[in-house]
Image: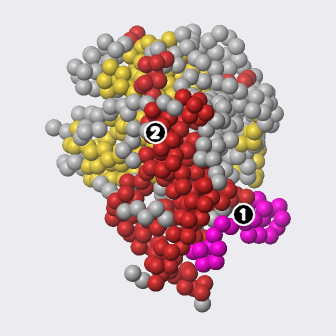
Amino acid sequence: MCGVRTGSQLNDEKTSEGKAFDEFVAREFNQIVALALAVLRDGDEALEVAQETMARAFSAWSEVGVMDRPGGWARRVALNLVTDVLRRRTRRKKLHLRLVGEHKASSNSSEVEGWDTEFWGEVAALPRRQRDVTVLFYVHDLSVADIALIVDVPEGTVKSDLSRSRETLRDKLSRSER
Amino acid sequence: MSDFEDQIRASAERVRQRGSALAEGADPKALLNRDGPARGDERRSRWILVAGSVAVVAAGVAGLVVVGRQGSDGAANNDGTPVSTSLLVTTTTILKRSTEVEPVITGPPEEAVPFDLSRPIADPEVCETVSAQVFSRTLLPPYPGGMPLTLFARPSSLPIPIQIIGQEVDGPAKPFAVLERFFDSDRNPWGREDPVNIGGNDIYLDNHLNGNGEAVWNLPDGSQGYLRSRGMSRDELLEILNALTPRPTDANVPGFDYNNSEPGAPQLVVEQMNTDAVRGQGAGSQCHVVESGWVYQISANEGELLHRFVSVIDRPPPLEVGTIGETLVIISGIADPSAPSIDDIVNADEATWRGLLGAPGRFPLVEPPIGVVRDVLVELSPAEPTRGESSSLTLSINEREGVSNYEIYLADAVIADAAQYWKIEVDGRMSLRTTVGSQGVIGGRLGDGVLTEPVTIRISTTDGDDFVIQSTGDIRLRPGP
C-alpha cells in the first residue's frame, strides 16, 4: 500500500521523521497509559489504548508531527478510545446479563485499589465531557486553557464541567461513605 | 485546598505512578508493525459495499408483504442487464410495524472496484481545485450499522418501496421522478395549489421554481403516495400520475404499476424496497473560480442505478448533471458564465488527488450574503483527524411566508462512525438536534421576516454525550444588499 510503512521500517531508517516520532512516543506514552488507566482501571486495556494511540499517531504522522500540540491530539484520540472501551464493556455486560441472567461485576483486573477504585469508578461514570475534563485536569495536571483546546470547548465550559464533576463526585463518594 | 481536593490529587498521583510502572514494561509501538492499509483507507473502503447473500429482516410486529424476493423484477439498465435488485442473491423482507429495521448480514462485503472517474477535478484552467474527498451518500442496509435509505427527510417505521420513472439511457442526467409509497404516514397531504383529482384521489401537485416537482396523495387503503421529480413539467407529472395504479400490498415491491406506452415517454427503470442494499461509491472535489470567486462542488458517482438517481435528486438542484463513461457527474454551485461544465471534468493523477484529499478546502465561509447567495457549501470537518474525513454540506437560507429558515442538505456529508446526532446552533443557542439517521434535508427557523442582522450557524455531529465529532465551525451569514 503506497505511503504506508511499517513501524520497524520507520525505526530502522532512523529518519528525522522517525526520530521525531520516537521522541513523541517517549514523551507521551506514559501519560496516555495513566490517562486511560484512570478511567478504565484496567492495566491491559490502558496499555492497549496507549498503544493504539501511538499506532494512530504513526499512521497520521505527516499531519500529527507538524501540529503545535501533538500531545493534545494524542490525548483526544486516547479519550475517544477510552470511550470505545467503556462502550464495549457496557455491551459485554448487557450480553452477559442476557446470557447468564444476572449481573456480575466486570472481571477486569483492577490496577487501582481502595478509595482510588471507587473514586475513578465514579469518574468513569460521569458524562463524557465532564469525565474527560476531570481526567485531564487531575491526572495530566493540565490548565483549563489546555483542556479547552483538547476537548474543543470554551474555557468557561471546562470550568463549569470541572465544577459539576467535583460536585457529583463529592456527593456520590460522601453518600457511599455513610 | 479542601480535603477532598487533596484526596483527588493524591489519587491522581498514584494513578500516574501506576501508569508509569505499567508503561515501563510495555512496548509503545506494539501495534505499529501491523500490516495493511492506513486507517483512512480502511474507512474509505468500508462504505463501498458489494453484497453477497443478504437477508434483510425488519424487526417488529404486525407484518405483511414481501417474502422471498429474487431480485429480478424486470427493470433494466443501459446495457439491458437487470439492475439493482438482481444484485441481491436472496433477499427476504418482512414489513412490520416497528420503529427499527435491523439488518441481518450473511456474507462478507467484497472489495471495492475502481471506477472510471474516481478522482474528479475540473480543468485547472477553468476552476482551481482546492480539496477533494471520497464519499458515499447512501447508507447501505446490509452493512452492519447501515440504515434504510430514507429520502427527502421522510422517514418511515415501515419499509418504503422506491421506484424511478425516467429514461433508460443516461437516466439520472435527464428528467425523472422518484415515487414512494408510505404505509404509516401521518402527514396530511398539502400543496400550494388546489389538488387535482386523478382516479378518485386528490393529488397535491407542486412545481417548484427550482425545477423540482412534488406530489402527495392519500390512497383509499390508508397508504400515501409521494413523488419527487427533477426537470419535469406539470403536464409531464400529470401524465405520470395518470399512469399509476397502486399495487397490492403483498406485491414484491408494493408501489405502483406504471402504464405509459407513449413513444419516448419515461419508463419505470428501477424499483426496490428502501431496506434493500444500494451499492454505490463516489468521489468529489471543490474548486474555486478565481475571476468570480465562486466555489463549485463536483461529484462523480458510480454504482447501482438507484444510487445514481438518488445522488441527483436528494439535494439542491444541481447546476449540471452528465455522464462520463459509466460515471454520473454532478456539478453544484452558482450559475455563472465562468462555472465549470461537465466537459471540463477530468481525472486527477494519483499524486495530485492524494494531496487534495488532505487539503482543508476553501469554502465561502466569510459572511456569505443572504439574498445573493442562497446555497453555500460548508465544510464539515472531524474534530479529530483520524475520526472521519472532511466532507461538505449545503446550507440554504430562505424566506418563506414571512419566516426566515435555514435548510441543510446532507447529500454529500460523510458522517463519522461515532456520530449519533446532528446538532445545529444558531447564534450560540441550540436550534435543532436530530439523529444522524435523518437524510436529505434538515432545517429550522431563523426568525420572523427577512433577516436584517447577521446570524451565526454552527452545524455539528455529536455522540450520545453531546461530544462534538464533526463540525463546520461558526458560519456567519450577513443579510444581502
Q: On the same chain: label 2 and label 1?
A: yes
Q: Is residue A93 left or right of residue A157?
A: right
Residue located 60% across and 18% down the image: B114
Circle count: 2
Classify B24 as above or below A168.
Answer: above
Q: Nearer the viewer, residue B54 or B175?
A: B54
Q: Quadrant of residue B225?
A: top right
Identity, as a three-letter code, of the amino acid under mark 1:
Asn
Q: Is residue B223 left or right of residue B433?
A: right
- Callout 1: SS: loop
Identity, as a three-letter code, of the amino acid under mark 2:
Ala
On the rendered image, what quadrant is the N terminus of chain A found in?
top right
N-terminal label among 2 and 1: 2
User: In the rendered image, which residue does mark 2 sit on?
Assistant: A20
Residue B428: percent from left, percent from top? 32, 56
- Callout 2: SS: helix
- The label number, if any, that marks residue B242 in the structure image: none
Q: Give the image's coloring scheme.
A: secondary structure
- The label number, if any, that marks residue A108 in the structure image: 1
| Residue B44 is one of the magenta-drawn residues | no
Q: Which residues are magenta?
A: A93-119
Residue B367: percent from left, percent from top? 24, 40
Residue located 29% across and 34% down the image: B364
Classify B49 as above or below B436.
Answer: above
Residue B411: percent from left, percent from top? 48, 34
Q: Is residue A168 visible?
A: no
On the rendered image, what quadrant is the C terminus of chain A found in?
bottom right
Residue located 68% across and 52% down the image: B98
Q: Nearer the viewer, residue B469 or B407?
A: B469
Instruction: List the single residue furthest toward the right.
Output: A100
Classify A14 as above or below B114.
Answer: below
